[in-house]
Amino acid sequence: MTKLLIILSLFTYTVSGAPDHFRLWFPQYGPTFEGYVRSCKETYDAYREDKPCRPVNYVGCQSGRMIHCLLSQATESLKANMASAGVILGLLPTTLCLVGLSTVETGLLAYRRPLLSLLLASGAPAISPSRIFDYRDSIELLRNRSTYINTPKFTPTWAAIIVTLQYILASVAIANLAHVSWELCIKTVCSFSSDTAFQPALWAFVAIPIHLMGRLAVALRFRCEISELEPGERSWARRLREEFQLTARHSPATLHTKQEAYSFIFCSWCTSTGAVLHIMYGTLVFSSILFISAQDAIKVAARYLCSTLICRIILKFEIIGMRGVMEIEKESKE
């Protein structure tokens, strides 16, 4: 939700024609760029006033002139440093996908704890891509074997503490991701889309619909059958209670594999392809970012990595907890 509000506000800036670049900068070269802006006062005023530009239909004309004015004053060492920052940030989407969340795992967790699954998908910007139609390896993670580590049986008090920490850490990951995306949107410029101020935040936001598509693919391929309700217990009450419990303390359930259908094949293809396109789009956006030093880029990359790792650890912990309470049945025709 936080990311969505930030993206909407940045998109409003863009479509309303309110220039918002070249005011705030990352720390290392901030004073230097501020001096360059003062030297480009006439060009900057034209950009702020959004004056007509020739050719009329050229997108990013005034912002493009402002970029040219700033770079024309930059030293070669500064340009080389910014080029290094472009390499660091350009590799970031591919690097994050190595520790990112799998849509299959978030889809499986959504069977038992949908709110937590959504928060984790929102806090991790990168998606770990999988081969098209390949769900076997992730499902094998749920098989309880003697060689696997199982989640300890925590006492109710410790379980409540851990659940609380999970939601707090997931919220912190989302807030950190939203803030660092906002900083990139406002304090830098994408060279291929200099008039827009939402590209980095849009990349982080697009991961959520891909996870939702992955959740639909999991629902089309598997069916989760939970044990019978206790006397006097309602299904919605149990779902609400289990949302705020560790999966290791949930009621036993059975995961049935359905017969493949064309709808599943389509959703699976869309999910896998979307994850690859998401990485490509992120590489395009982050490699084209200007006006940030390599040192500041490392800090930005570290913040993205922290959010991703936090969500990954929580997700892995819950998937391990599901092993002891969920059985996997062989494929059945439905």
Image (tube, rainbow, N blue to C red):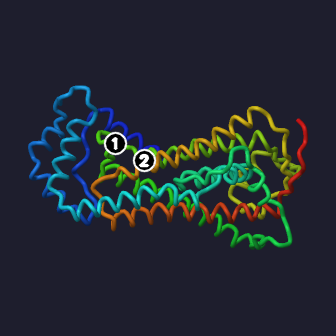
Number of numbered discs visible in the structure rendering: 2
| 246 and 301: which is toward the camera | 301
Mark 2 or 1, nearer chain start: 1
Which residue lies at the image location 39% right of the left edge and 59% below the top edge? 87
What residue type is disc 2 on? Leu
Q: Is residue 129 above or below residue 213?
A: below
Which residue lies at the image location 47% right of the left edge and 60% below the top edge? 304
Question: Cα distance, mark 2 to mark 1?
Answer: 9 Å
In the image, residue 205 lies at what x, y percent? Answer: 49, 46
Circles 2, 1 touching at the beta carbon (< 8 Å)? yes
What residue type is disc 1 on? Phe
In the image, residue 35 lies at what x, y percent? Answer: 13, 58
Q: Is residue 172 above or below residue 49?
A: below
Picture quadrant where residue 332 is located: top right
Picture quadrant where residue 272 is located: top right
| 23 left or right of 239 in image | left
Outermost residue, top side: 56
Category of crowding for the residue at label 2, using alpha-carbon neighbours closer than 10 angstroms: few (below 14), some (14–19), many (at least 20): some
| 313 left or right of 141 in image | left
Which residue lies at the image location 22% right of the left edge and 49% below the top edge? 22
Instruction: Give the secondary structure at mark 1.
Output: loop
In the image, residue 162 lies at what x, y percent? Answer: 65, 68
Find residue 316 and name its label: none
- From the image, tell me which residue sits under label 1: 192
In the image, residue 168 lies at what x, y percent? Answer: 55, 62
Q: Is residue 253 above or below residue 293?
A: above
| 56 and 153: which is toward the camera | 56
Category of crowding for the residue at label 1, using alpha-carbon neighbours closer than 10 angstroms: few (below 14), some (14–19), many (at least 20): some
- From the image, tell me which residue sits under label 2: 284
Instruction: Give the secondary structure at mark 2.
Output: helix
Picture quadrant where residue 297 is located: bottom left
